[in-house]
Image (cartoon, rainbow, N blue to C red):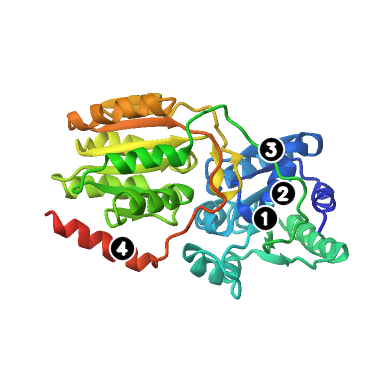
Amino acid sequence: MDIRVYVKKIKELGIETVTGVPDSTLKVFCDYIGSEGKNIFPYHITAANEGAAIGIAIGEYLATGKPACVYMQNSGLGNTVNPLTSLTHTDVYGIPMLLMVGWRGEPGTKDEPQHKYMGKITPDLLEVLDIRYTVIRKDTTEEELEQALNAAKEAFERNRQYALLIQKGAFHKEEEGVYENGSVLRREEAVGMIAGWLEKEDLVVSTTGKISREMYEQSDRQIGNHRQTFLTVGGMGHANMIACQLAKRLPGRRIICLDGDGALLMHLGNMAVIGEQAADNLIHICLNNGAHESVGGMPTGAPGLKFYEMAQKAGYRRVLQVQNGQELQEVLPVIRRERTLTFLEIAVSLGAREDLGRPKETAKENRKSFMDRVKEYQ
C-alpha cells in the first residue's frame, strides 16, 4: 500500500496528533511522518514508551475531543495494558484512539526469538483488551482500508479504541530517512574497546538490539567467547535493572551494563532506583546516538538529553561523559581504579555494518552459559 494513501485516509478520521515509539515494521510510516508529518499532522510526538503514548492520546481527546493515532511494535503492547484497561476502556473513561501495531513474530514468518511468543498472542491480546482490529497486509486494497477505517470510526463513536495490525512489508518503501547526529565514534568501535577492557571475572548485561549483537561479535573476536555477557535480546529498557540486582547479589564481581539511550529513556526512573541502591560494583554505560537505531534509526523523543547530568542528580557517585575514542581509551582505566557506582555516557554515531551478525545460540542457551560463568568465580 502506498504510504501516502494510508496516511491520507488516517487524517480523514479527524486525527491531528500522532504519537508512539518507532518500530521497524512501521519504518516506512515513521520515515514519512518524520519528513512530511508537520505538513499532514499538526502534532507528532515520539514518546518515551508506549504507555506514555497512550497518555498523550488521552490528553489529546480531553483537550480537543479528537482521537489520536498511537503507533508501536507489538512488543510494546505490554507497556499499554495498564492505561488501556485502567483508563481508556469504555468501562472507565472511554477514550477513543487508533492503535497502529507492527506485527513482529507473526506466526508463519521468520523473526527473532524475542518476538515469537508475543507475535503468536498479539491477536488474542487485542481481543482480551476488548479492542477490535483489522490486519493490514501486503495485498490490502484501498477499499479494504476504507472498510477498516469505517469500523474504526464506528468504534470512536462508541468511545472505544480500534487497532490496525500491520504486517511486515504492508507499506510501499519510499526513500529511507537518513538520520545523523554529528558524533564521530562508531558504536561498534566503542563496544570493542569495552570488550577488550573486560577482565575475566567481570559480568556484562547488554541491552536489546544492535548493542547486544555488537557485544556478541566483539566478545567472540577478542575474548574467544561471550559467556560473561547476558544478552537482553527483548524487554527494552530492563537491562539496567537486571544489572543492578546482579551487582547487589554478587558484590565481589564488577557488573557492567551496556545500555542504549532509547532503552534508558523508556524507563528513566530506573536511574533513581540505581542511585538509591548505590552498588559500588556497578558500571552503567549509556551508548548514546539519539536514535532508536535497531528499528530503523528514527530519533528518540529526547535526542539531545544529557543522561550524565541526570545520573548525577539520581545519585550515581561517579559520572563521566566522552565524545570520541581517545577519551574513552583514557577513561576506562580510571573507572577500574576505584570501585564506586559509575555512570558513563558515550556519544556515538548512527550506523552499523550491513553484515552485523546475530546470536547463534538460543536465549535459553545464553542464559545457561551466563549462569555457568557466574558460578565459576564465586
Quadrant housing the N terminus: bottom right
Mark 3 highlights which residue? 44
Looking at the picture, tell me which residue is in the foreground, 174 or 40. 174
Per the model, the C-alpha gap separating discs 2 and 3 is 12 Å
Per the model, the C-alpha gap separating discs 2 and 4 is 35 Å
Disc number for residue 100 = 1
- Mark 2 or mark 4: name the one nearer the start of the chain: 2
Q: Cβ–Cβ below 8 Å for labels 2 and 3?
A: no
Can residue 65 be seen here? no
Q: Nearer the viewer, mark 4 or mark 3?
A: 4
| Residue 120 screen position, x and y as percent | 55, 72
Disc number for residue 367 = 4
Q: Cβ–Cβ below 8 Å for labels 1 and 2?
A: yes
| Residue 244 screen position, x and y as percent | 27, 45
| Residue 7 screen position, x and y as percent | 80, 49
Neighbours of disc 2 within 10 Å: few (<14), some (14-19), many (20+):
many
- Dot 1 amino acid type: Met
